[in-house]
Image: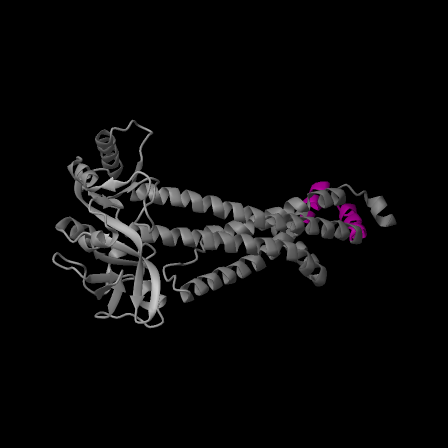
Amino acid sequence: MILDYFCLAFRSLTGRSVRTRLTMIGIFIGITAVVSLISLGSGLQDSINSEFEKIGKNRIMITPGGANFGPQGGDMSIGKMTEDDLKVVRKSKGVEVATAYISKSAKVKFKDELKFLNVWGFSTDSDAQKTIKSSGFLELEKGRQLKSGDKFKAVIGHSIAYDTFDDELRIGDTLVIEDKEFKIIGIQKSSTMSNDNIRIPLEVAREFYDTPDEISGIFALSIAGEEPSVVADRIKRGLRRFRNLDAGEEDFSVQTAEQMISQLNMILSIVTIFLSGIAAVSLIVGGIGIMNTMYTTVLERTREIGIMKAIGATNRNILLLFLIESGVLGFAGGLVGVFLGFLISKTGEFIAIKMGVEFFKSSFSLFLIFGSLAFSFLIGAISGILPARQASQLQPVEAFRK
């Protein structure tokens, strides 16, 4: 019986194809926007999560001032940290290794080109070596890592090597950083965390920036089997005691990788939902279009409705027929919208890869596909409620007079 309703609805819609296509426009524009935005937003979220997983779940980041996960350029003028803070972190229960870094903007020259780039002063001790080995985002594409005894050597990010200067940088090339020559010994793999950074030995960076004791932050690894969040709390308590601060007055931030991923996911989800909500406004226009079309259909098929009622069709049968017809109209628009949304999201992925963001992939799940189609059918059916109700209440005698 239900199949018969769908067959009748399909025949009715194909019989007035021009009006059907015009009515579908509002629906498929809305579904296209929603599908493409959700696909790109989910893809971005999955891609960034994948990149952050390379950091390691047992990693803890301690920074002065606000919560800045990962080395950032610029001077840290609030809540400065020193080597004494590093000693406190290393003594905290559950910390396996901890290493400090300095991160500031520096004048970098290659041949005749001058740039201002992020330069990390990174320790070359055993703790730093272990930290680097445990971090996927510091993996090398070519060359080797900094090691103890290195002085004027540098490891450069993927973008620095291939995109920053007119000529590509290679292993063995020389960079001039703050008027000092550095030999490139390593090029990192592409990563969202360190594409635009240059790593040099910490001791050399101290000479540049004249910061004999100050550091920009601390990387720490928790011992296997210890909960990173628990270890982070211990570090926070230890630093509060050392700095003579009360809870809530911290001038430093202690974050685990999981906490950062959670915060980032929440932000991305809110942005995606907000943008999708704006895009979904066009579905209201599409729904009004379907309602208008169904009202016109009821007027055109008044005699047909009268005949169906005369041969035994009930009000419920007529109501269901027109509801399914309006739902199918919305569903057809949804099909087109899903297809166009897929094309747009894949185009966005292609453009991102061409721009060097190789980690980005759009996410096109079955839930998104079937959810969009079900939603478009529902929008169509809801929009057809009033016209369907009007059709179901027509009296056979009145229908034959029109």
State left or right for residue 344 relative to residue 69.
right
Residue in the picture at 30% in, 71% down: 111
**Which residue of the protein is positioned furthest toward the right in this rendering?**
401
Q: Is residue 149 above or below residue 258?
A: below
Question: Is residue 225 visible to the viewer in this orientation of the structure?
Answer: no
Range drawn in magenta: 301-322
Looking at the picture, the colour scheme in use is: one colour
**Up/down of 377 relative to 157, above or below:** above
Across and down, in percent, residue 166 comes to 36, 71
Q: Which residue sits at x=47%, y=61%?
A: 348
Query: Looking at the picture, how far across and down is residue 279, in whole percent?
Result: 57, 50
Q: Is residue 122 magenta?
A: no
Q: Residue at x 19, y 60 (%)?
A: 145
Q: Nearer the viewer, residue 360 or 200?
A: 200
Q: Is the magenta region chiefly helix, strand or loop?
A: helix
Horizontal side of residue 361 vs 255, given as left or right? right
Residue 354 figure quarter: bottom left
